[in-house]
Every structure is written in structure tokens, then in C-alpha cells.
Amino acid sequence: MDLHLKTSRQVVKDYMELFVNRRAYTLQSMRPHPESGRHYYFRPKEDGSSRPAALTQATIREHLQGTITIGLYAINPTTQRSKWVAIDADYRNAIEDLLKLQYHLGEDNVQAALEMSKRGGHLWIFFASPLLAKECRIYIYNLASRWNVPVKESGTSDGIEIFPKHDTLSAGGFGNAIRGPLGVHREANRRFWFYGADYCLETQMEYLKGLRRVTEGQLRGFIAGKVTPAAQALALPSPKPAWEYRGEKRGKEFDILQHVGKVRRVGRNYVARCPSCASGGHDRGGDNLAILISDTRFYKCWAGCTKQMIRAALGQPIRAWQTA
């Protein structure tokens, strides 16, 4: 088993340079959620403070050694730029779609690194300098559309997820983190490697450092005349039947905003603490729950809690005559 590995100072330095675009991170819980069995992520705090802990080389060393597992944020909200794009796919035939994208990226002279994952894989693209998140997303969305690769964010039940997940962040915003590569996945209890290099930290980092990085000029050329598809936020379910809103007997329409406390705006959504995660001692950062601003009936937990779990945690279970 390779759960605990020695890590050199150079590997830590290279990892920081390649993957870290801001000094914020999430931490994967060592204990599974009592109901779902999943190891959720939370934002750790500085000792004796409510401030988020800063990501340091010591933290990265622990991650690479296998002591902890961190999640990385793509966007720096000061610049709205990212050092990389990660394409996450964890559905049936996901690897086939990732290999298809990797091949067609190669036709653009873009070298993408394929990382193993528990259910599928991640495809990583690195930049010569941090590039605008919006432009990165335009490129991947249009590439996926051109080659018929489904994108979950645009309404499909299965499909790739693109990190960064937002075009821009508000000041002080975080967005969504993705598991930091080369660490130990707590649910799988194993380390996932990149294809293309021997399974040790030094050779993996040398492989990643040797990949050709995309420049801003190249990216602008790829996306000339293109835009991001309109549906980017939450996948909206079909409208509820009209009878669900009529009559006092059935009660008033449920409004999640009346039950979740403090919210903040991120793009097209409000974000708040997920009640289900919080009941298990998770979501300390208070941003797992996304609520569609234009219609607050539609909300989801990015950590995987179902609407039934969220409503139950609020003491407002979904009745038999209601839809989720």
C-alpha cells in the first residue's frame, strides 16, 4: 500500500507552482458521514479563529505524504483567473469520453494529463500563466459540444464537470474545490495516479512539469467567436404541477431561504450551509448548498445530499403529494 510516502522539498515546491492558484483549501473528513458513508470536505479554520486556514507548503506536504487529503480551488477571485482546468467524469463510459477529449485536445496541440479516480477520471490542462476562468470554460464547453461529450452542468443527468465551475467569483468567494491530485482518497482508501508516468511522486511531478502549457494567445485563438452555453448553473427539473401550489390543505410552497440562515451570492446562485451536511458536523465553510436565485424552489447540495435528506434535516420532510 502506498498510503504514506516520503515527500521531498522539491516535489512540494513543484506541486505548489503547478496546482495552487490561491491559499485557500478544503479538507476531506477522516470519518464517513453516518448516513451517507461519504467523506465530505470542509474548509478548515485557523486555530482559535473563524478565519479559513491558509494553504501552506506544510499542508501540501501532509497531503502528498497521505496524512490528510485536501481540495483545491481553481479561481483566484482577485484576478478571476485559474492555473488549470480539470475535467471530472464519474459516470458509465466516463473514461471513453475523457480519452476522446484528450485526443481532440491533442489536435489543438494541447497536452492533457489523465488522472485515475474512484469511478472514472480527471483530465487536467495546465496554463503557462493563469488565464481567465470564463475563457477556459468557453473552450471546454465548446470542445465537449463539438464531440458530443455530455456536460452535467448544462442539464444532463450524467456528464463531465468542468473546474473552475464558475465564470467569475465575487470578492472573497470560493467556488467549488476539487480533490488535490496525488493524495489519498479517503473513501477509496487509496492514492490515484496520473497515467503516463511511474507511480511515485517524483516521476509523476516530472511528467506533469514536462507537459506543454497553454498560453493566453492560444486560448484566445481557440475560443474566437465562441460563447459559453446559457445553461451553466443548476440543472432545472420540470415545473411542479399547478395543483401542488393551490389550497391551504396542501400547505404553502416550501421556501428553502426561510430555513437556511445566512446566504451569499455566487454567480447565478445563493450559497449557504447545507442542513444535512451540518447535522453530521460537515460543511463548516457554509457553502455546500446552492440555491438558484431566479427560482429558489431549485437547490442542490454539492456534497451529494439529496433533497429528501436536506428537508428531513430541517424537520420539513417531503410529503407524499410533493415532488422532490
Image: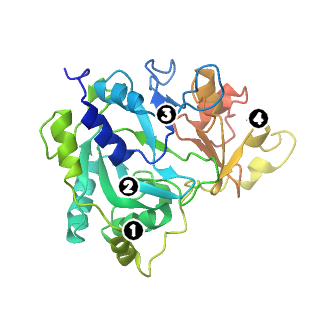
Residue on which disc 1 sits: 139
Q: Is residue 77 visible?
A: yes
Residue on which disc 2 sits: 85
Amino acid type, residue under disc 4 in the picture: His
Q: Residue visible at 69% across and 30% down?
A: 317
Q: Residue visible at 21% across and 70% down?
A: 107
Mark 4, residues whose alpha carbon is within 10 Å: few (<14), some, or many (≥20)? few
Q: Earlier in the sequence, mark 1 or mark 2?
A: 2
Q: Residue visible at 44% across and 33% down?
A: 56
Element assignment for label 2: strand
Image quadrant occupied by the N terminus: top left
* Residue 294 at x, y percent in the picture: 71, 58
C-alpha distance separating marks 2 and 4: 35 Å
Q: Earlier in the sequence, mark 2 or mark 4?
A: 2
Look at the numbered discs 1 and 4 and tell me whether their residues touch, using CB distance below 8 Å: no
315 left or right of 173 in image: right
Look at the numbered discs 2 and 3 and tell me whether their residues touch, using CB distance below 8 Å: no
C-alpha distance separating marks 1 and 4: 38 Å
C-alpha distance separating marks 3 and 1: 27 Å
Residue on which disc 3 sits: 26
Q: Earlier in the sequence, mark 3 or mark 1?
A: 3
Q: Is residue 93 visible?
A: no
Q: Is residue 226 above or below residue 130?
A: below
Q: Quadrant of residue 280?
A: top right
